[in-house]
Image (cartoon, rainbow, N blue to C red):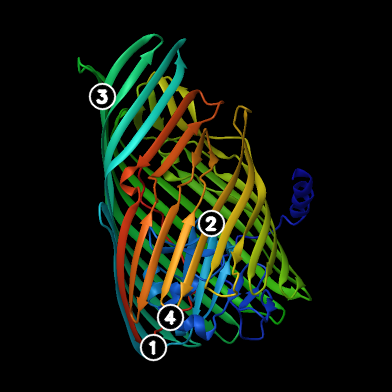
Amino acid sequence: MKKVLYPVFFLCGVFVFSQKAAKNDTIGQGATKEIQEVILKSQRKKQFADKSVYTFDKEALEKARYAKDLLQTLPELQLDPVSNTIISTKGGTALFLINGIEATDLQIRSVAPSEVVRVEYYDIPPARWASRAETVINIITKSNETGYVFGVDTMSGLTTGFVNASAYANFTKGKNNFGLEYFFNLRDYDDRQVQSIYDYQLNGEHYRSDENRKDHFGYTSQNIALRYTRMVPDQYAFQAKLNMDILSRFSKGTGESVFTKDSFREEHEMFKNSGSSYAIPKLDLYYSKKIGSKDELSLNAVGSHYSTNTTESAREWIVPSEVSVYDNDMILKTEQTNFVGELAHTHDFKAGKLSSGYRISSTAISNDLNNLAGHSEYSVNYLEQYFYTEFSGKADKFSYRVGAGLTNIHNKSAANTFDEWSFTPKVILGYQLKNNQSLRLTSSYSPTSPWSSALSSNVVQLAPNIVQKGNPFLKSQQNFSNNLIYSFNNKKFDFNASLFYRYTDRVINQYYVLDDTFGGYALTYENGKNSQRYGIQLSGSYKPFGSSLLVIKAVLTPTSETLRTSKGALIKNDYLANNFSVSSEYKSFSVQYMVNIPVYTLSGAFLNTNENQNHFFASYRLKSWSFTAGMYWIGMPSEYKTKSLPESLVDYNVHTRIMNNKSMFVLGVSFDFSKGKKTELQRKLNNETAPAATF
């Protein structure tokens, strides 16, 4: 495999210059030539250098209730029955847009199938979203007409606390559109079983803590959104969106532990409780103005201000004396202000399109903290600026998008200030081999800022002699990514093979170190020397009958990954990531089965498994109604495993199982109704503020 990969990676390195694009590419209807497609006339697919474009025939449009049903038919997308949302078969985060504006699952449901013109599927996301998602899906709709649409949906487990519920409504009249959404998500599980082991040498003595705990945990998540849009075609567009995210989370656990020190043995008992809550009000304003026939200026501003409350309380004591081993009480209160602003300009040339812009994002957090280190009050600020320009076009069978960006990361914590400018180029090249085959190459270089919990100075007790804390002195990591992708499709097959190589300098690594402050070990973060990840990803779908009567989707990704720590130790891991699904649709009935084999992937000093899948569900549609029944994690609980590497100072293993999920049976019903058509804004800028800062 290495003999094949090394020449490919060398070729990719030749094309290192590229950009972090901030412009969403759409199929132009004017004289401008953007990245040109390979038109597959026998199929409803067009292949671009950085995306695929899908259209749908009359039969598919008549079968679907809304646009969400159409997305399920794409080769590398599927419905996740647990969250009732569309996900990528390849894993990772998927970002959805409607006419270029970021859209929720409910907004996708509010789009009638007859309004969908095409769907743009970016397996190489535009750079403005590249740091937020591995896949971007943009739904292009028809022009506005007066109309309304509304719907409700609920799905619930019959034997445990599992509820997904939602409602939405949209009304359009003339150039104005009003939208309202509500989403409710509940999890309340009283049987999560956790087995963990800490094994280590400290001061010449051997320690081992063997813990078994049962938790009652859950969360309630709500989202309320109100939108107003006014659009005057070929002149200007304005949108104001007020959004409120409400979250409360809790965990209450009790357990027993066997603690040994050399030949000495003790029986311990414990409790571990935690909780967090916040409500995030968010205002999103967008305005775009046409300047002549070839220029457009766009402005986007997103802001939020809110408080968060996070608590952790844990105690372990000796049985039967009740002498305390440790007491851990952490109370974190924060005031958080987020802002994102972006200004962008596009100009259409005869030979292509030029896009330029500037984006700034700021997160300011004031912390009031009580923990093992005592009480402290401090402020942190994370600031990122990004300048970019790009040009896209076509030359004969070659298509391209080339550009350059300049990124500034300025992180100021209570203990340190980090400021750095980085040149962020990117290039995407496409070549048409045949009508149904293409070859694509992408290469990019970009920085990634540490996340807030990694930079935090907070301290939490995990076990006797073991604490966890952040590192305010972390630097950003630098990512160099290359992909060489071959695509092929016909009536029955849609196939992609991608050779990939990713090199990360100053990689952020979590590991154990001796801790003088608390007299044991601390799980913390460092900037390692580098990491590498390379392999091949095979993905796609197969329709034996050339229709949705039977569809098989699969992803196989043999991967090799290495990490070199700051002290020079080399950590290596190989795995075969996988995901499979089989679905069938006949008239008003549909069924789907999803399964995978979990694998260990490298995460700092640990190997972590992905979530297991073994789900089956069936649906029946009756006009505007849909009825669903399913069973998730058939014959097994959802489970998660973590184990430390031989290089780790602490030998750590944990196995978590949510027994409430085992063979969980759910029922669901939804109703969707629409009349007329809606105004959908084709928005060029989309931003999101930072998430709530918790530890």
Q: Mark 2 — residue?
A: 580
Q: Residue at x 51, y 55 (%)?
A: 92
- Asked if residue 147 is positioned above or below residue 507 in the image, the reply reads below
Check the picture and name the quadrant holding the N terminus. Answer: top right
Whichever of callouts 2 and 4 sits on the residue coming sooner in the sequence is 2
Q: How many marks?
A: 4
Secondary element type, mark 1? loop
At label 2, the amino acid type is: Phe
- Distance of mark 4 from mark 1, alpha carbons? 10 Å
- Asked if residue 150 is positioned above or below residue 668 in the image, the reply reads below
Q: Is residue 543 visible?
A: yes
At label 1, the amino acid type is: Lys
Q: Nearer the viewer, mark 2 or mark 1?
A: 2
At label 3, the amino acid type is: Glu
At label 4, the amino acid type is: Glu
Secondary element type, mark 2? strand
Secondary element type, mark 4? loop
Q: Position of residue 690 (x, y in %)?
A: 41, 54
Q: Is 30 positioned to the left or the right of 291 in the image?
A: right
Q: Residues within 10 Å of mark 2 (few under 14, many from 20)?
A: many
Check the picture and name the quadrant holding the C terminus. Answer: top left
Q: Mark 1 — residue?
A: 175
Q: Nearer the viewer, mark 3 or mark 4?
A: 3
- Distance of mark 1 from mark 3, alpha carbons? 65 Å
Q: Position of residue 597 (x, y in %)?
A: 52, 47
Q: Residues within 10 Å of mark 4 (few under 14, many from 20)?
A: many
Q: Which disc number belongs to residue 322? A: none
Whichever of callouts 4 and 1 sits on the residue coming sooner in the sequence is 1
Q: Mark 3 — residue?
A: 269
- Distance of mark 3 from mark 4, alpha carbons? 58 Å
Seen from the viewer's position, the closer of residues 188 and 525 is: 188
Q: Residue at x 41, y 26 (%)?
A: 197
